[in-house]
């Protein structure tokens, strides 16, 4: 995945904790920050059950118009 550089200013006490965690886990500070941001975003972003409706050939023409029916079938009922 392509990456993009950014700068973030953190309080000194946060940096001390990050450095300590970095040593303890054997991970770079960059990796810890990436993981933290990814976790934060995954909790904050709305969940999508179907992200690519309309792509592909299932043989069913009404998937996008009758999504609830397919969600029910997908969940076993």
Image: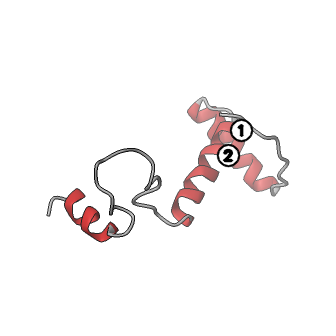
Q: Residue furthest top?
A: 26
Query: Where 12 falls versus 21 (above or below)?
Result: below
- Residue that numbered label 1 is attached to: 30
Q: Residues within 10 Å of mark 1 (few under 14, many from 20)?
A: few
Residue 17: % across, % down = 68, 48
- Which quarter of the rendered picture does the C terminus lie within? bottom left
Q: Is residue 69 above or below residue 56?
A: below
Query: Looking at the image, which is closer to me, 47 or 17?
Result: 47
Please rate how many residues cluster around mark 2, counting C-alpha atoms within 10 Å: few if below 14, some from 14 to 19, many from 20: few
Q: Quadrant of residue 44?
A: bottom right
Indicate the position of residue 35 as horizontal and vertical percent values. 60, 45
Q: Is residue 29 left or right of residue 6?
A: left
Using the image, determine if residue 6 lies above or below residue 64.
Answer: above
The residue lying toward the viewer, choosing from 53 and 11, is 53
Q: Residue at x 82, y 41 (%)?
A: 5
Residue closer to the observer: 4 or 28: 4
Element marked by disc 1 = helix
Answer yes or no: do the residues labelled 1 and 2 have beta carbons within 8 Å?
Answer: yes
Element type at mark 2: helix
32 displayed left or right of 6: left
Residue tagged by mark 2?
Answer: 33
Label 1 and label 2: CA atoms lie apart by 5 Å
Residue 45 drawn at (x, y percent): 56, 64
Name the residue rendered at 83%, 46% in the picture.
6
Residue for point 65% across, 34% down = 1
Residue 4 at x, y percent in the picture: 78, 40
Determine the image quadrant of residue 24: top right
């Amino acid at each position: 995945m392509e990456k993009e550089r950014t700068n973030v200013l953190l309080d000194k006490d946060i940096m001390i904790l990050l450095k300590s965690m970095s040593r303890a886990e054997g991970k770079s500070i960059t990796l810890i920050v990436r993981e933290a941001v990814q976790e934060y975003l995954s909790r904050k972003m709305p969940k999508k059950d179907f992200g690519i409706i309309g792509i592909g050939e299932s043989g069913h023409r009404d998937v996008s118009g009758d999504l609830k029916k397919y969600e029910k079938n997908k969940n076993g009922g």
